Image (cartoon, coloured by chain):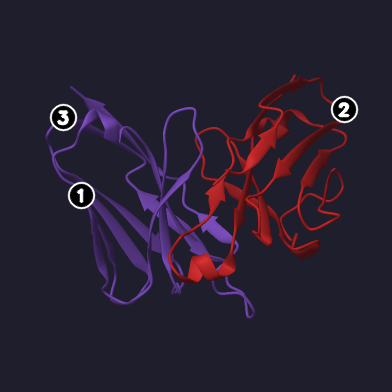
Amino acid sequence: EAGVAQSPRYKIIEKRQSVAFWCNPISGHATLYWYQQILGQGPKLLIQFQNNGVVDDSQLPKDRFSAERLKGVDSTLKIQPAKLEDSAVYLCASSLDMEIGLGRGYTFGSGTRLTVV
Amino acid sequence: GQQVMQIPQYQHVQEGEDFTTYCNSSTTLSNIQWYKQRPGGHPVFLIQLVKSGEVKKQKRLTFQFGEAKKNSSLHITATQTTDVGTYFCAGPRISTTDSWGKLQFGAGTQVVVTP
C-alpha cells in the first residue's frame, strides 16, 4: 500500500513570500489532516478535511494560511505571506475513520520542512 | 482547553535498562494513541488504547491506559539503540460529533540511548 505522499521535501523562502505544500493521501482515505510541527514540539493540528469538506479549521491562522481539497483526494496548504515563526515541518496525515475505530491510527507523510529567513 | 502533557521531556537511558514515559490529559479521553518519531522522520503509529485499565504489549513495549482514562504510560524494557526517537501520546480533541479524529499530541518524550 502506497503511503501518504508530500512535496516538496524541503523549502526555504524569505519572509513575506508565499509557499504551497501538496499532499496525496492513501487511496480511499476520506479524512485528511494538516499538522504543523515546530522543532522540539508535538504536531499541532491546523485543519481536518472529510472528503472535500472542512471539518475543523479552528486552529488555522486564516489571515495567512489556507487549505483546500477540491476533489476529495489531493490537498494543498498555502501560506501567504510567510513569517519567521512559520518555520516548521508541515505534516499531512490521512485516515479511514473505520480504521481508527479498529485501532490503526493515522498515517503520516514524510512532511515538508519549511525554513523562513 | 484540553491539554495532553508528557513527562519526562527527555530520557537518557543506558542500553539494556528499562524506562517509563507518562502521558496525562486534563480531560477524559475516548481513546489514546502512541506514535514514535525517529530523528528526522515522521510520526509512526504504534498503538491505540480504548478501554479503561487496558494493557497492551508489543515485544519490549508495554502500553497502559489508566482506569479513569485520563492518563497513559509506555514502558520499554531492555532498551536498545533502535528505541531512539521521540514518543508522542495523542488523544482526540473534544468534539460532539467525532470522538476518534483531530488528535491532540503531547510534546513528546525524547529518548536517547547510550550504548
Q: Which chain is purple?
A: B
Q: What residue type is labelled 3?
A: Glu
Residue at figure coordinates x 77%, y 48% from the top left: A74
- Name the spot of residue B58 as percent of width and height, x first: 25, 53
B70 and A90: which is toward the camera: A90
Between marks 3 and 1 in the image, the one whose residue lies nearer the viewer: 1
A93 and B26: which is toward the camera: A93
Tell whether B105 sits left or right of A88.
left
Q: Which residue is under mark 3?
A: B15
User: How many neighbours does mark 3 have within 10 angstroms: few (below 14), some (14-19), or many (20 or more)?
Assistant: some
Q: Earlier in the sequence, mark 3 or mark 1?
A: 3
Residues tagged 1 and 2 counted as in contact (Cβ below 8 A): no
Distance between the alpha carbons at the discs numbered 3 and 2: 47 Å
Residue at figure coordinates x 80%, y 44% from the top left: A76
Label 3 sits on a secondary structure element that is loop
Residues tagged 3 and 2 counted as in contact (Cβ below 8 A): no
Query: To which chain does the residue with label 3 belong?
Result: B
Same subunit, tags 1 and 2: no
In the rendered image, the quadrant that contains the N terminus of chain B is bottom right
> Relative to residue A4, is residue A86 depicted above or below?
above
Q: Which residue is under mark 2?
A: A16
Q: Residue furthest bottom?
A: B96
Which mark, residue B59? 1
Q: The red chain is which one?
A: A
- Name the spot of residue A111 as percent of width and height, x first: 62, 35
- When asked about the image quadrant of residue B78, the answer is top left
- When asked about the image quadrant of residue A65, the answer is top right
Same subunit, tags 3 and 1: yes
Residue at figure coordinates x 28%, y 57% from the top left: B73
Distance between the alpha carbons at the discs numbered 3 and 1: 16 Å
- Name the spot of residue A100 as percent of width and height, x first: 50, 66
